[in-house]
Image: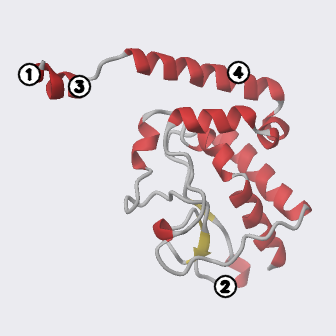
Amino acid sequence: TPLLHNAIGGCLRYMAESVAIFAPSYNAYRRFQPGCHAPTFPSWGYENRTVAVRVPAGSNSARRLEHRVAGSDTNPYLMFAVLLSAMLEGMLTNLSPGKPVTGDGYAKEADPLPVYMPEAVKLFSESEFIRKATGPELQRIFTLTKEQEIAEFRKRITALEYQSYLDKL
């Protein structure tokens, strides 16, 4: 239906700036690689598991969306708040999702989703949509928390780094 298409359009329009909610940990970004069953572009399609928003097959009365960006570590309350706000915005402003992807969603020619936490947090912190969807205080506190996590991770040397470089130095 046109309303469903507008809801999908909203999901796609605000997806990149919402990734910090959908992927709230450093580990969550490891799955954002082409061919790893996690979408890397804001895309949609019918019965296509390589896209970010999938419309599964079924009767019109059973029509639904499958949002494939959020990981298992997402906060469901924040995820649904952002997702429903994006869908509502799409319906209120008649956002078009564009044509559905029929082939490989990883080969889509569009701006990719952020695949690194610092990039996702920057988009989140600067987003007027996020400010409206979550409130400025949540946006500010979430951003500060994630920036603190990023700073802490940057200070740590991983076992892989020791294994890779210790013998070479």
Seen at 58% across and 25% down, the residue is 146
Which comes before the other along the chain, label 3 or label 4? 4
Residue 149 shows in this picture: yes
Which comes before the other along the chain, label 1 or label 4? 4
Q: What residue type is labelled 2?
A: Ser
* Image position, residue 104 (x, y; %): 46, 74
**What number is the disc on residue 161?**
3
**What number is the disc on residue 59?**
2
Contact between marks 3 and 4 (CB within 8 A): the answer is: no
| Mark-to-mark CA distance, 1 and 2 | 61 Å
| Mark-to-mark CA distance, 1 and 3 | 11 Å
Comparing labels 2 and 3, the label whose residue is closer to the camera: 3
Q: What element carries label 3?
A: helix
Q: Quadrant of the image for the C terminus?
A: top left
**What number is the disc on residue 141?**
4
Contact between marks 1 and 2 (CB within 8 A): the answer is: no
Which comes before the other along the chain, label 1 or label 2? 2
